[in-house]
């Protein structure tokens, strides 16, 4: 190789690094002044993350009945209805009607059990009617398959991004995606799915949010607080995810708890920031999580 060729290669490498450096500096400058990702609708969580970032995988994990589906659907509602971002949702537990009721209950602030039992009052119908136009026009695509293989999911997600311009992909039930090929180790199957979700996020340059189950560890622990080791069937989820949010409600274990209606968002893994605890309000009758009211200030 001649000295001239070496110089040309060096210039190319230097130019490539310079471009990378410039892009990084631009992103750092933008991060200081605006939301760089898709806002979740949770004030403190968005302040921590600047929104759900393209290429990142966020996992929301909890024991049953803690509110992980409510949080996931709330993020999707905020993205599609409040912000107008095309959003693709995959849920393996709800029918289309069930998911629609979740949206209308949370948006209209109508008790979900009244919708299901057909006992809505006149004021409930009025609240829902006010929100229907915005829900109807929201760029939200909902998939409710009874079963789906990993390849089928990946193909559909790519199609949603390509043809519908999806900017957020949400999965309610990471463990419910079936492997293309069965493995004797369930842990390996779930790990493959988690890694595939992370790879998909990077490939499509969109954030991916998924819910996951926890094992019975919290029930066997004093205080019942979840830990990363409680992730069911796969420690690989911990390594694949950029952020893991563990949900905990004291009133789920202690009915007379003074913290009734509160839910802790435990940021147990955060690849690009600190781990911390965020407290929100869980309006279980509406099936939604909202920010806690700020404490009053005294001048």
Image (cartoon, helix red, strand yellow):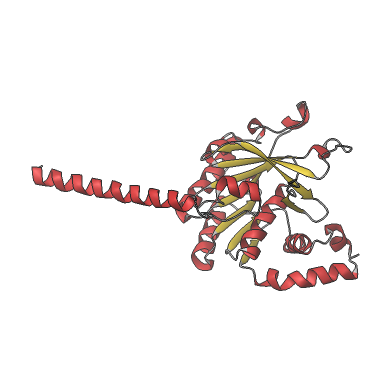
Name the residue: 16% across, 48% down.
8
- Asked if residue 136 is positioned above or below residue 225 in the image, the reply reads below
Image coordinates of residue 84 in percent, x first then y, are 60, 66
Quarter of the picture containing the N terminus is top left
In the depicted structure, whether residue 181 falls above or below residue 154: above
Percent x, y for residue 95? Answer: 73, 60
Q: Can residue 2 be seen in this view?
A: no
Judge by depth and name the residue closer to the eye, 270 or 210. Answer: 270
The mark tally for this picture is 0
Where residue 86 appears, x then y in whole percent? 57, 64
Rendered view: 183 above or below 222: below
What residue is rendered at 76% in x and 31% in y? 224
Farthest front residue?
299
Residue drawn where x is 14% and y is 43% of the image:
6
Using the image, determine if residue 84 lies above or below residue 235: below
Is residue 263 at all visible to an observer of this figure?
yes
| Spot occupied by residue 194 in the image (x, y as percentages of width and height) | 56, 43
């Amino acid at each position: 190789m001649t000295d001239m060729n070496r110089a040309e290669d060096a210039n190319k490498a230097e130019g490539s690094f310079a471009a990378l450096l410039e892009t990084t500096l631009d992103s750092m400058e933008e991060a200081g002044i605006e939301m760089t990702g898709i806002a979740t609708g949770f004030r403190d969580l968005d302040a921590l993350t600047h929104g759900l970032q393209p290429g990142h995988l966020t996992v929301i994990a909890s024991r049953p009945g803690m509110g992980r589906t409510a949080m996931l659907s709330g993020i999707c509602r905020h993205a599609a209805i409040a912000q107008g971002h095309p959003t693709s949702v995959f849920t393996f537990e709800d029918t289309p009607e069930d998911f629609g009721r979740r949206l209308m209950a949370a948006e209209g602030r109508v008790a979900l059990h009244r919708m299901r039992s057909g006992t809505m009052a006149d004021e409930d119908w009025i609240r829902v009617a006010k929100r229907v136009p915005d829900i109807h026009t929201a760029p939200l695509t909902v998939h409710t398959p009874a079963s789906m293989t990993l390849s089928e999911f990946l193909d559909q997600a790519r199609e949603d991004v390509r043809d519908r311009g999806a900017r957020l992909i949400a999965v309610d039930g990471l463990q419910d995606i079936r492997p293309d090929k069965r493995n004797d180790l369930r842990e390996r199957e779930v790990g493959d799915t988690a890694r595939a979700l992370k790879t998909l996020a990077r490939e499509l340059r969109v954030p991916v949010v998924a819910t996951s189950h926890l094992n019975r560890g919290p029930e066997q622990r004093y205080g019942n607080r979840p830990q990363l080791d409680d992730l069911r069937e796969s420690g690989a989820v911990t390594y694949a995810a950029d952020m893991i949010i563990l949900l905990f409600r004291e009133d789920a274990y202690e009915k007379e708890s003074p913290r009734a209606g509160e839910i802790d968002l435990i940021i147990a893994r955060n690849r690009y920031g600190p781990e911390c605890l965020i407290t929100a309000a869980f309006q279980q009758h509406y099936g939604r999580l909202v920010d806690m009211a700020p404490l009053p200030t005294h001048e």
